Image (cartoon, helix red, strand yellow):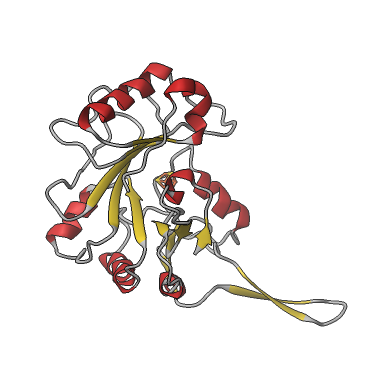
Amino acid sequence: MNKTKIDWVKGTDNKQGYTWNPVTGCLYGCEYCYAKRIANRFGLHQETNKIKVLEERYVIENNCIITGEKTIISNPYPYDFTPTFHKYRLDEPSKKTKGVNIFVCSMADLFADWIPDEWIKEVFETCKRASQHRYLFLTKNPDRYIDLYEKKLLPYKENIWLGTTATMPTDEFVFFRDTPYKSFISIEPVLEPFGELAKGEMPQWVIVGVETGNRKDKVIPKKEWILSIKEQCKGAGVPIFMKESLRELMSDEFIQEFPW
Ligand code: SF4
């Protein structure tokens, strides 16, 4: 578990933000994926087409040719961006007794179809054991939330925020107004104007951001796209958090609100 500077994870209630990655790797192949770039850069280039389970940290032993001294280095991405369950990380939240905000799986999509139910169940069992924290999940595959909820495989509900990532209005949003889970949507990076955000129901929080970096085909949104989202949030009484990447574009309209 690592401290993070991700602005929406840090929160306003003095809860330090952390990322926790019991699972890394993702197969969606989004062109703007920063996580894949990191994993490929630091990985050991043993990518496979099978999901992987690591019971222990993956370590490499080196013998120095000159001194004969042995060094042991652990590598968090031995299979690069292949979906990998790092079981040895499951106890990390329990080691921190003070409650913090935790973005779970910032380097993966935990609810993607290729992730076994069992992995998710074990992650939720950890959340239950370390209930002092607030857990923030994000997926591009919100149908999996419903599937697992109906199968009663998400029994722990306190302090759980189930988020959906969307980049364009055709992406599917699933909100959980009628369940014990809290819900949010992260519109990032905005690739198109959104029109009506939700018909009849809204999530409990909206995050919006743009792509950063110098990628050639990066989309620069128009201010009115973001204003439309902001107005809909205001109308529905839903807090909206604009990421730092929007500060300059939005100037006086820039706002960062939290639901807690
Ligand atoms: S869903 Fe997220 S983690 Fe997966 S490829 Fe896309 S940006 Fe990367």
Of the pair 95 and 32, the residue shown nearer to us: 95
Q: Is residue 93 above or below residue 200?
A: below
Q: How many discs appear?
A: 0
- Give x and y (percent) for residue 92: 45, 71
Residue that appears at 53% across and 24% down: 248
- Give x and y (percent) for residue 188: 40, 36
Residue that appears at 23% across and 40% down: 203
Residue 198 in sight in this render:
yes
Taking the image as shown, residue 205 lies to the left or right of residue 180, namely right
Residue that appears at 36% across and 33% down: 167
- Give x and y (percent) for residue 206: 32, 37
Of the pair 124 and 132, the residue shown nearer to us: 132
- Give x and y (percent) for residue 87: 42, 73
Taking the image as shown, residue 170 lies to the left or right of residue 180, namely right
Image quadrant in which you'd find residue 152: bottom left
Image quadrant in which you'd find residue 240: top left
Taking the image as shown, residue 45 lies to the left or right of residue 108, namely right
Residue that appears at 53% across and 49% down: 5
Q: Is residue 48 above or below residue 185?
A: below
